[in-house]
Amino acid sequence: MKPLTTTLFAMLLAGAFGGVCFERNVLSNTRSENQRLRGESEETARLVRENAEINRLRAENQEFEQLRNETRELHKLRNEVRQLREQKPEWDKLRAQNQKLRAEAEPASQPASRAPDPASLIAKEMLSDAGFGSPEATLRTYFWAMREGNMEKMRTCFSPDISKEIISGGPGPTFKGFHVVAKKVLSSDEVKLGIQFFAEQGAPPVEFALPFKRVDGEWKLNMAL
């Protein structure tokens, strides 16, 4: 009976050892799986943090672009104001020269008057597409296109270096007419015209100066209105 007992004991011992080994393998696999899951959890947390950082950077970039666009518009407005301020002395000078010429042309017995000569007024009904052969012709063409609401023709009245995006429509067909009150030749290719503009409602006339430039044989407006 001793050999049988010994054999059974050996079998039990082997089974116990095998169970221990199995449990160790299971425990090892479980640890490996836990480590893998912990690593994936940490990677997921890292990706969540990176995604949040990307969203924050994207929002900051959008805000920066908005600020940059607003700054660009502000610079544009300031530049337009500066240009208008620089042109005002020229307008005042042309107005003073016009007043002087009128005073010299009128008889001494007649009082000075700023009332326009009706014969010299170019009414809107008289306007037509006069081409670009002279500054005066270009002016007629421009106001004709304004009366007709022809934006494309209005744009062709300006020199090519003027941005077409800032050329907008004027008073449209509501104006009464205009006439040229002064002309200053700056060079063979540059001229300024002093204009007196009359609104339809009978408001006082508005005076301003317009620069013209000859481009490829055609006279064009050289400023953005």
Image: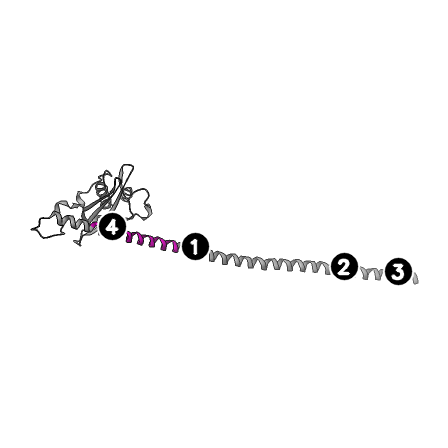
Question: In percent of the image, x 36 and y 55: which residue is there?
Answer: 74
Mark 3 or mark 4, which has the lower sequence index?
A: 3
Compute the Cα span from label 2 to label 3.
Answer: 22 Å
Compute the Cα span from label 4 to label 2.
Answer: 102 Å
Give percent across and percent down for residue 219: 26, 40
Give percent across and percent down for residue 56: 50, 59
Q: Does 203 sit above or below residue 188?
A: below
The residue range painted magenta reads: 70-94
Q: Callout 4: few (<14), some (14-19), or many (20+) C-alpha neighbours within 10 Å?
A: some
Check disc 4 and give the amino acid type: Glu
Mark 4 or mark 1, which has the lower sequence index?
A: 1
Residue 7 visible in this rendered orientation of the protein: yes
Q: Nearer the viewer, mark 4 or mark 2?
A: 4
Compute the Cα span from label 4 to label 1.
Answer: 39 Å
Q: Which mark is residue 90?
A: 4
In this figure, which residue is indicated by the disc labeled 1?
A: 65
Whether 89 is among the magenta residues is yes
Horizontal placement of 103 versus 47: left or right? Answer: left
In this figure, which residue is indicated by the disc labeled 2?
A: 22
Is disc 2 placed on a helix, strand or loop?
A: helix
Q: Callout 2: few (<14), some (14-19), or many (20+) C-alpha neighbours within 10 Å?
A: few
Prevailing secondary structure of the magenta residues: helix
